[in-house]
Image (tube, rainbow, N blue to C red):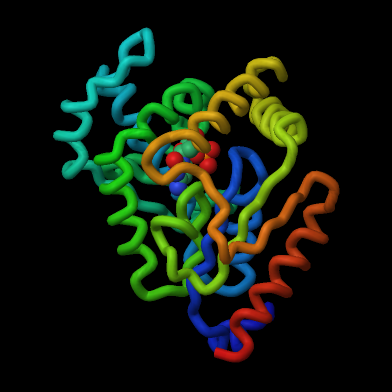
Amino acid sequence: MTSEKEISYIPKIIVAIDGFSSSGKSTMARELAKRVGYIYIDSGAMYRAVTLFAMNHGLIAGDGNVSKEELIRALPSLDIKFQPSAGEDGIQHTLLNGKDVEQEIRSMGVSHNVSPIAEIPEVRQRLVEIQQEFGKDKGIVMDGRDIGTTVFPEAELKIFVNAGVHERARRRWRELVQKGTDINFEDVLRNLEARDKIDTTREVSPLRKAPDAVELNNDAITHEEQMEWLLKIFQERTENL
Ligand code: DC
């Protein structure tokens, strides 16, 4: 599955990977896309980019209150794109109105403000439209919360990833510390718990396992075992197409 020749024969399907924050779904999705020559889209990055826009334009007050009307008016002018990895980090970068915001959208400030933004129906509607456009030719792996339920309910392969909240907080905390962020574990844990609650209870497109999704709990498996599992399912779903 790694040679260029083989990749050109891989049929194009839509792979939807949903799950809780920091469950490792983005890493899985990115690696699968790379292995099979698909486009990778991180839909969470798109909600983060809208949040950064709102923060930079004074649309989120100190108490977290969002100026929804103004944000909704600005939505048509927002251009969110992804730049294939060119840099040394090998990671695809998110562009907001042409500016690389990959670092900024991963900050704790954005993490704290993103849930109320992702609850706004007009924001979701706009981002879902863009996401569906990205997937119109298939050959795409997209990760998020509502990809298998709302964005691509017809996706040929749906994965729902889960892990305990403490394990996810540990992973997220380690990642932030490695990037040089001075943050304590309890803050990361509280942020994840709060986001889990909002993600699963919001009215529009709450995080749910699609009935036809395959569930993976990756609490106790290695990264390699997870990728082996994922590639096997992908092969099974594509070999008879
Ligand atoms: O995957 P992430 O943690 O980077 O996502 C950031 C936030 O965006 C998350 O708190 C929930 C929201 N989100 C969403 O509501 N729907 C998606 N498809 C992806 C993310």
Tell whether 173 sits left or right of 12: right
Single out the residue that lies furthest toward the left: 73
Please state the horizontal and vertical placement of residue 77, each as a whole percent of the image: 17, 42
Figure quadrant of residue 152: bottom left
Q: Residue furthest top?
A: 62
* Camera-nearest residue between 188 and 82: 188
Q: Quadrant of residue 96?
A: top left
Q: Quadrant of residue 21?
A: top right
Q: Quadrant of the N terminus?
A: bottom right
Residue 19 x %, y %:
59, 47
Name the residue nearer the viewer: 71 or 88.
Answer: 71
Could you tell me residue 164's position as x and y percent? 74, 37
Left or right: 237 as drawn, with respect to 111: right
Q: Is residue 68 above or below residue 2?
A: above
In this picture, is 144 found above or below 15?
above
Q: Residue at x 65, y 28 (%)?
A: 176
Residue at 50% x, 52% y: name it.
Answer: 92
Q: Does the rendering let one see residue 103?
A: no
Is residue 115 visible from the viewing direction of this image?
Answer: yes
The image shows residue 80 at horizontal and vertical percentages of 32, 47
Q: Camera-side residue: 220 or 57?
A: 220
Image point 67% across, 32% down: which residue? 172
**Residue at figure coordinates x 37%, y 15% from the top left:** 64
Q: Quadrant of the C terminus?
A: bottom right
